[in-house]
Image (cartoon, rainbow, N blue to C red):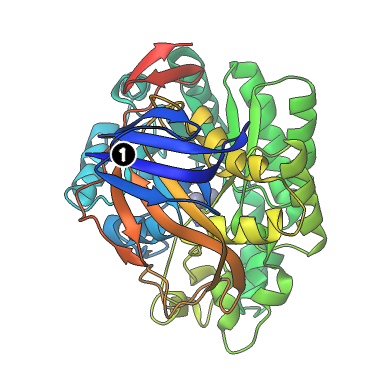
């Protein structure tokens, strides 16, 4: 099967030109001006952007968390992603305490079997190196294409690890070529503040934010950076929300250290005003780290512009408001933490980043596709439009209006963080490895089309599906 995408404005992290992109089977085989080739199908992209499929390195599909399970499974979550122009994501496998990493991986793979709509990889969230997984087993994961380890410095009594586990994992990562990811909040401090709030009778959703101050994020970010320095491991700080965490990351990067930071779409648009909404609506905005004061919006836009932060992900961790978030109606600490977003990252960042003049189109592609692909061992297969790359392509119509709503989105959750927002610019056609996934607002391909992608080790490139040293 061959497809010719004709006359679109091809935009990568580096380039911006009008041209034709020729796809044969799963890959891009030719790019040029007015290509004279026969194709099984021609897609007229004039007036449209031709973007690499989005890569979302931070999602939680079908994940047990907070006394329940995230509402989007692999099929619904990936369908939402496809409609939003994301063609590859990296999900978190959570090691249950006492279980081996192999058992956790098997479990996650069985949840994905036959349901995959887009391509995916896995990070391993390490929760226990005493009873379950061993350091040796952890060291074997990069050879299996699982080339990033995640540690939670918060969620005491659930996913949180101590500094010893964090540091030992970092040491293994330094040896095996894995990237260490941290959820950076001081879990001990938060635990004390939560208990004090509840003892004082403060149970509403806003206390979720008030018991997780920005200093808790700043302290843990600093600690993780210093520990990674000692271990000699590369570090990626997930879901950065505030100046207290941006500053140490920016400083580490100025020094040339191997430290990167990510923020998520929702942190540019939500604030304390949302979590304070009446009638328990504030619970929709309970995620961690929490919503912050609005002054942080400019801090984050500036950070993604200057590369203090290098990726925008979604941290898609969707729960129903009615039935799951309501578990915490009488106690904010029982509200499952997380929010939806997989479908709307490109919509929102294009509208309020590019169209509002905050970032360029090239930078948008870099933040949503190229940088996550590079950092997580998917580049150049994913994250760019180039000869030899997978034909994961978004034909994006910059003039198409789209109003975001839970009534039309593809996640199973019953609310949308951006409800009622009208954006100008939306995917018209989405291709995954040369298969048309989305067209005319319909999912055209069947679940099963997506694949697991073995990722390259940190600092190595993925060529032809195999990791090769750069
Ligand atoms: O509240 C959030 N972010 N839930 C998902 C788990 C995590 O911390 O990333
Ligand atoms: Zn987290
Ligand atoms: Zn997360």
- Quarter of the image for residue 74 reads bottom left
Q: Is residue 275 left or right of residue 130?
A: right
Q: Nearer the viewer, residue 387 or 300?
A: 387
**Under 8 Å from ligand 3: the CB of mark 1?**
no
Residue depicted at 38% across the width and 32% down the height: 36
Location of residue 258 in the rendering, given as x and y in whole percent from the top left corner: 64, 22
Location of residue 338 in the rendering, given as x and y in whole percent from the top left corner: 50, 62
Q: Is residue 22 left or right of residue 1?
A: right
Residue 95 visible, this orientation: no
Residue 379, placed above or below residue 214: above
Residue depicted at 52% across the width and 54% down the height: 314
The residue carrying pointer 1 sits among few (fewer than 14), some (14 to 19) or many (20 or more) residues within 10 Å by Cα, namely many
Location of residue 368 in the rendering, given as x and y in whole percent from the top left corner: 56, 44
| Outermost residue toward the bottom in this view | 279
Task: Pick the quarter of the image with the N terminus.
Answer: top left
Disc 1 secondary structure class? loop
Q: Nearer the viewer, residue 269 or 360?
A: 360
Residue depicted at 42% across the width and 71% down the height: 409
Residue depicted at 51% across the width and 82% down the height: 329
Q: Nearer the viewer, residue 13 or 20?
A: 20
The residue singled out by tag 1 in the image is 433
Q: Is residue 141 left or right of residue 302?
A: left
Location of residue 306 in the rendering, given as x and y in whole percent from the top left corner: 77, 37
Question: Total label count?
Answer: 1
């Amino acid at each position: 099967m061959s497809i010719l995408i004709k006359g679109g404005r091809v935009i990568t992290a580096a380039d911006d030109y009008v041209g034709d992109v020729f796809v044969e089977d799963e890959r891009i085989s030719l790019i040029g001006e007015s290509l004279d080739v026969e194709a099984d199908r021609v897609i007229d992209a004039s007036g449209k952007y031709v973007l690499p499929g989005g890569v979302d390195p931070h999602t939680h599909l079908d994940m047990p968390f907070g006394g329940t399970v995230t509402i989007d499974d692999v099929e619904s979550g990936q369908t939402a992603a496809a409609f939003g122009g994301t063609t590859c994501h990296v999900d978190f496998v959570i090691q249950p305490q006492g279980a081996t990493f192999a058992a956790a991986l098997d479990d996650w793979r069985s949840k994905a079997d036959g349901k995959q709509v887009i391509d995916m990889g896995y990070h391993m969230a390490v929760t226990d190196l005493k009873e379950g997984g061993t350091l040796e087993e952890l060291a074997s994961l990069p050879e299996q294409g699982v080339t990033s380890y995640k540690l939670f410095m918060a969620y005491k009594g659930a996913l949180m690890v101590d500094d010893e586990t964090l540091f030992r994992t970092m040491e293994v990562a330094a040896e095996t070529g894995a990237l260490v990811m941290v959820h950076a909040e001081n879990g001990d401090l938060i635990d004390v503040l939560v208990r004090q709030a509840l003892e004082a009778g403060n149970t509403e959703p806003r206390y979720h934010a008030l018991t997780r101050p920005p200093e808790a994020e700043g302290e843990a970010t600093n600690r993780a950076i210093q520990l990674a320095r000692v271990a000699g491991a590369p570090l990626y700080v997930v879901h950065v929300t505030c100046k207290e965490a941006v500053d140490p990351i920016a400083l580490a990067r100025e020094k040339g250290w191997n430290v990167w930071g990510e923020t998520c779409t929702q942190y540019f648009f939500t604030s304390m005003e949302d979590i304070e909404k009446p009638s328990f609506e504030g619970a929709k905005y309970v995620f961690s780290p929490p919503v912050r004061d609005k002054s942080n919006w400019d801090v984050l836009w500036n950070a993604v512009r200057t590369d203090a932060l290098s990726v925008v992900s979604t941290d898609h961790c969707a729960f129903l408001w009615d039935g799951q978030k309501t578990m915490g109606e009488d106690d904010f600490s029982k509200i499952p933490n997380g929010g939806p977003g997989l479908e709307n990252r490109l919509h929102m960042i294009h509208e309020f980043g590019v169209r509002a003049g905050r970032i360029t189109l090239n930078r948008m592609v870099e933040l949503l596709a190229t940088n996550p692909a590079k950092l997580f061992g998917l580049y150049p297969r994913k994250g760019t439009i180039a000869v030899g790359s997978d034909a994961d392509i978004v034909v994006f119509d910059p003039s198409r209006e789209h109003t975001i709503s839970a009534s039309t989105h593809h996640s199973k959750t019953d609310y949308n963080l951006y409800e009622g927002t009208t954006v100008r610019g939306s995917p018209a056609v989405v291709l995954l490895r040369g298969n048309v996934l989305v067209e005319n607002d319909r999912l055209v391909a069947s679940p099963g089309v997506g694949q697991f992608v073995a990722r390259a080790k940190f600092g190595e490139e993925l060529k032809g599906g195999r990791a090769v040293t750069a």
